[in-house]
Image: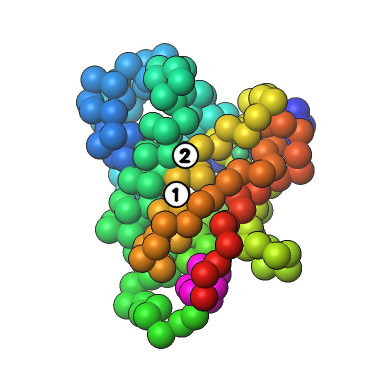
Amino acid sequence: MADRKDTMIVNALVRQALTSAQEVMGENGLNAVLHTSELDRFIGNFPPNNLDPAIQASQYAKLNEAIEAFYGRGGKGMLRRIGKASFQYAVREQAALLGLAGVALKLLPEKQKIKFILNSMAGALKKSNPDVEAWLDDSGERLAYHESTCAVCQDRHSETAICHLYAGSVSEAIRWATGKEYEVTETHCLAKGDPYCRFEVGDVRE
Ligand SMILES: [Zn+2]
């Protein structure tokens, strides 16, 4: 997917990622990977919480790659944790963007809760950047969240799926909505040559 357009990521999302990475990795760890991914300008200087453009998707992808490399075999787990922290940050600081302000899901069936939150995630991303193509597919046996403009793997190539931070965010979103842990598996990834990244949700227990 070499011809994929290198879109912009807004300040709010970079701020979310950096705050969460710092929470999980500590300040020194974050500063080290900011340096190796040539994002030194963010050391001790996170972007503001607004929707102005911050960095190219490919730079965000480099940051993800640097975190994975920094931890070696533990990279996947760390990125998942950062993704989870990212969603928690979004709920705390960006509930309006996510469309969660004042929302009560308690009375909805489990599947509806998951559909609601994954649609909210896709909607928030599209609001942050109209070039984003993200959607929920509920036509198959399992629910699956897709993005064909995934920034985590922009300009990256791999034989396996690599958008662990994204998978962490999806799983934490579902935990927020249902109060339960669901397995989230990245079955397709643009980095492998698939047409989109696809995050499949484990069987819904109604
Ligand atoms: Zn991806």
Residue toward you, 206 or 110: 206
Q: Is residue 112 above or below residue 27?
A: below
Pointer 1 residue Cβ closer than 8 Å to ligand 1: no
Q: Quadrant of ligand 1?
A: top right
Residue 105 image point, x, y percent:
40, 78
Please give the name of the residue rendered at 46% of the width and 82% of the height, measured from the top-left corner.
108
Residues shaded magenta: 110-115
- The residue indicated by pointer 2 is 165
Of residues 109 and 82, the one drawn nearer to the viewer in this rendering: 109
Write down the residue under mark 1. 169
Q: Is residue 8 above or below residue 67?
A: below
Q: Nearer the viewer, residue 88 or 56?
A: 88
Q: Is residue 113 magenta?
A: yes
At label 2, the amino acid type is Leu
Specify the amino acid type for callout 1: Ser
Q: Secondary structure at mark 1?
A: helix
How far is the residue under mark 2 from the one under mark 1?
Answer: 6 Å
| Residue appearing at x 41%, y 67% in the figure | 177
Q: Is residue 186 visible?
A: yes
Is 94 contained in the magenta span? no
Check disc 2 and report its element: helix, strand or loop.
Answer: helix
